[in-house]
Image (cartoon, grey):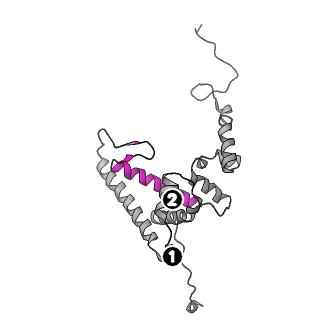
Amino acid sequence: MAKGRPRKSNVRRTKSGAISRAAGAYHDNEDGIALRMRVFGLTEIEARDQKAATYVGRLCLAGNRNSTDGISAAQYDAAVAYLEAQQNFKRAVKSPDALSTGTGGASGPDGAGYDTWCQRAIAKWESIEAAIQTEQGFHENRGANMWAALDYLLSRDQALPHMIGDLRLGLNAVGHHLGIIPFRAKVDESPQAA
């Protein structure tokens, strides 16, 4: 006879044999979900989505509702790629990350392929910056501030609705550069084309 507490019967178990707690997991965060719904005006399904945690994610959810204040799913993917490239660049140059952690720098030995990874991360970030700067320099984008929109709305996660248009332009530049957003063919509207 085994010593210890008797095994509970008639309970769901995981593959490892532990008692499953999945049945109650749906109701674990009801207070936080209700708060997101009330503060940000989201539906319950949207409030449970992980995108609702950030301002750009909520803009993507608004874009999915066909709202004029949102961004597309492809622009959201470009935002995720931008943040990943930015973090990789910061890690490659061993930059302090004062915005999110208050600390920075790297310590410890680096692996064998670390130098080549650093070179690729720096080159990718510099090419993204060049693509944004090129888009910023176009005459039709005069007056837009893509750099500030990407910094405040994306990197710092601040809600500034007046910068959404500039954010869209910046994310389009990043998406075009990385191949996430395809280029649209320009329509020739000149009188000779008719």
Which quadrant is the C terminus positioned in?
A: bottom right
Q: Quadrant of residue 62?
A: bottom right
What's the residue at 39%, 66% (across, down)? 130
Q: Give the residues drawn in magenta, as a range.
A: 73-102
Where residue 121 appears, as percent x and y from the top left, is 36, 54
What residue is shown with label 2? 78
Query: How many C-alpha atoms fall within 10 Å of the one at disc 1: few (<14), some, or many (≥20)?
Result: few
State the residue lying farthest toward the bottom: 192
Considering only vertical position in the picture, is 86 above or below 194? above
What residue is shown with label 1? 140
Considering only vertical position in the picture, is 144 above or below 18? below
Q: Quadrant of residue 122?
A: bottom left
Q: Which residue is more in the foreground, 171 or 117?
A: 171
Give the amino acid at mark 2: Ala
Dot 2 falls on a residue whose secondary structure is: helix
What's the residue at 65%, 32% (across, down)? 22
Dot 1 falls on a residue whose secondary structure is: helix
Left or right, 22 with reference to 90: right
Give the amino acid at mark 1: Glu
